[in-house]
Image (spheres, rainbow, N blue to C red):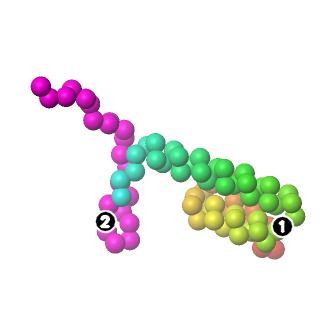
């Protein structure tokens, strides 16, 4: 008798990469990426508070690279560059 196990039904999002291949993301994977970006941004604030502006700039640029719309990261980068 075949198994009646249901296949996962998480919503899928497809994003084309540079070479034209399709990358399939589940909603859970996208949510996890947002959590990672948020944690990285909070960690950068600690680096900034320690007084290391160059390190903070480097890490803010990494957060910006992962999600250009995350909070006020772009404005913080501008402030650190001036």
Given contact means CB atoms under 8 Å apart, are the residues at marks 2 and 1 in contact?
A: no
Secondary structure state at the residue bearing disc 2: loop
The N terminus lies in quadrant: top left
Residue of label 2: 21
Foreground residue among 3 and 39: 3
Residue 50 within the magenta-colored segment of the rendering: no
In the image, taking residue 17 as reference, residue 49 lies left or right, namely right
Label 1: which residue?
A: 52
Q: Nearer the viewer, mark 2 or mark 1?
A: 1
Between residues 57 and 70, which one lies in front from this camera angle? 57
Vertical comparison of 79 with 43: above or below: below
Q: Local crowd at mark 1 within 10 Å, few (<14), some, or many (≥20)?
A: few
- Residue 39 in percent (x, y) is at 66, 50
Label 1: element kind: loop
Q: Which residues are magenta?
A: 1-22
In the picture provided, is 6 more to the left or to the right than 31?
left
Q: Residue at x 63, y 61 (%)?
A: 63
């Amino acid at each position: 008798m075949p198994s009646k196990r249901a296949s996962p039904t998480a919503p899928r999002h497809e994003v084309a990469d540079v070479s034209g291949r399709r990358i399939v993301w589940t909603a859970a994977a996208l949510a996890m990426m947002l959590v990672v970006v948020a944690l990285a941004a909070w960690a950068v604030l600690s680096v900034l508070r320690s007084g290391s502006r160059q390190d903070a700039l480097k890490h803010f640029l990494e957060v910006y690279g992962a999600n250009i719309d995350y909070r006020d990261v772009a404005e913080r980068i501008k402030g650190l560059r001036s």
